[in-house]
Image (tube, helix red, strand yellow):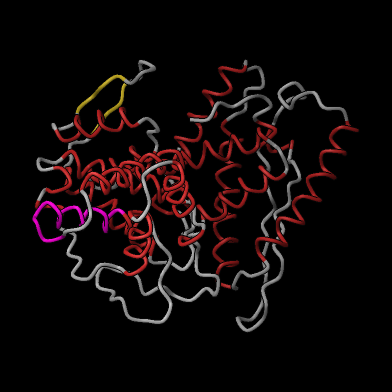
């Protein structure tokens, strides 16, 4: 959970309800979410508000409006009417959540620690009773507001919105199956050793444990194969798109899949890891051939890193066409797909399995294992 510095309560901005009326054939108008503070609604004192002079407040407001206008123009110029409608509905719910939180936080005499705890408790209470009725655009609107706060360099507002976001994700996660919950926990665990320990405890049936900070963590019991398959399904969906939306998240999912698979009885060669690839993908095969043709070292590692970051052979499709990538996709077509991290490691593992079975010659297993390990190290650097 992000640490929240003061001012907090004054960071709650209550945008007025907005409505747009346009036909689906028209270009949607630029969306502007007003940032005007409603101090009468927030009941925040001058001290809680941070002690800004009127001149400082005016200067901050001018800078915020300038950033807001530029951000709105850049990010929403290509949105469809349906996306605007979802954003507006979600924005109304975010506004409603902020208003209810502000009503709960009426005590102006709280110190910094008490105020932070009060915000967390208010978020838990308000979100808990609304999570089942949230619009599909709620998270979209929340991310949009967080992005605006970041562009405005308003750390307090951003911190508050992130508390709401994490609270929503926490409530949604608890409604998910155990293996889905575990994937979410692993995505928020930077250290490799900690992820391995988490996987071991989950595979052993879960339970309540203390983390490094002494806080109690409740882990569900889950099957390692289910965890690996869940991560694989998610990353396959991401990799099938013309443009990867989040390289960090993709790297994390690949790491989770590989680590869960390695922890199973037979490691990478466990029969449960049969990928079902009848034909190896052309892009990944070509890139792997390029790597094994060179001596392992810094140059090869940099080539791997560039591709994992979406450069060189891993660059996204610039034309925006739908990718034909998938487990059942063949190698036909004039233009190969970009090399994707998850599919690349699938290919390396498949070739390794062929070497160990004696079906592939001319490539040393040690060379491929070096490629595999260095790819995982690069993904760790990208993911966290």
Instruction: Kindly indicate the quadrant of the structure image that contains residue 293.
Output: bottom left
Q: Is residue 252 left or right of residue 272?
A: right
First to last magenta residue range = 345-360
154 in relation to 302, above or below: above
Residue 1: where, in percent of width, then height?
48, 30
The residue sitting at 19% across, 31% down in the picture is 200
Could you say which is closer to the camera, residue 258 or residue 134? Answer: 258
282 in relation to 216, above or below: below
The residue sitting at 33% across, 57% down in the picture is 344
In the rendered structure, does residue 219 fall within the stretch colored magenta? no
Chief secondary structure of the magenta span? helix
The residue sitting at 49% across, 58% down in the picture is 245
The residue sitting at 51% across, 54% down in the picture is 138
Q: Is residue 333 left or right of residue 346?
A: right
Residue 50: where, in percent of width, then height?
75, 25
Could you say which is closer to the camera, residue 186 or residue 307? Answer: 307
Residue 237: where, in percent of width, then height?
36, 62
Could you say which is closer to the camera, residue 380 or residue 78? Answer: 380
Q: Is residue 207 left or right of residue 26?
A: left
């Amino acid at each position: 959970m992000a640490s929240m510095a003061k001012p907090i309560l004054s960071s709650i901005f209550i945008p007025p309800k907005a409505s747009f009326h346009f036909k689906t054939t028209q270009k949607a108008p630029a969306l502007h979410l007003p940032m005007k503070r409603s101090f009468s609604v927030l009941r925040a004192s001058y001290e809680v508000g941070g002690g800004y002079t009127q001149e400082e407040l005016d200067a901050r407001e001018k800078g915020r409006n300038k950033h807001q206008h530029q951000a709105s123009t850049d990010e929403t110029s290509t949105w469809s009417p349906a996306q605007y409608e979802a954003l507006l509905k979600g924005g109304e719910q975010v506004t409603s959540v902020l208003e209810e939180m502000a009503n709960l936080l009426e005590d102006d005499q709280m110190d910094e620690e008490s105020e932070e705890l009060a915000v967390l408790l208010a978020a838990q209470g308000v979100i808990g009773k609304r999570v089942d009725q949230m619009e599909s655009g709620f998270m979209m609107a929340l991310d949009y507001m967080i992005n605006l706060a970041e562009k405005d360099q308003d750390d307090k507002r951003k911190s508050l919105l992130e508390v709401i976001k994490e609270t929503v994700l926490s409530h949604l996660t608890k409604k998910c199956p155990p293996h889905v919950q575990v994937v979410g926990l692993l995505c928020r665990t930077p250290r490799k050793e900690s992820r391995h320990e988490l996987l071991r405890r989950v595979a052993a049936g879960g339970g309540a444990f203390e983390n490094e900070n002494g806080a109690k963590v409740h882990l569900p019991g889950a099957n390692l194969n289910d965890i690996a398959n869940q991560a694989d399904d998610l990353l396959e969906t991401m990799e099938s798109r013309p443009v990867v939306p989040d390289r960090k998240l993709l790297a994390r999912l690949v790491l989770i899949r590989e680590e869960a698979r390695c922890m199973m009885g037979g490691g990478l060669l466990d029969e449960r890891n049969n990928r079902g690839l009848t034909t190896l993908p052309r892009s990944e095969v070509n890139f792997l051939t390029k790597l094994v043709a060179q001596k392992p070292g810094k140059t090869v590692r940099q080539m791997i890193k560039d591709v994992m970051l979406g450069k060189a052979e891993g660059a996204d499709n610039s034309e925006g066409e739908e990718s034909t990538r998938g487990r059942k996709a063949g190698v036909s077509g004039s233009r190969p797909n970009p090399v994707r991290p998850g599919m690349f490691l699938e290919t390396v593992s498949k070739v390794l399995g062929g070497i160990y079975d004696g079906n592939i010659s001319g490539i040393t297993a040690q060379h491929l294992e070096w490629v595999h390990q260095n790819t995982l190290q690069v993904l760790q650097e990208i993911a966290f």
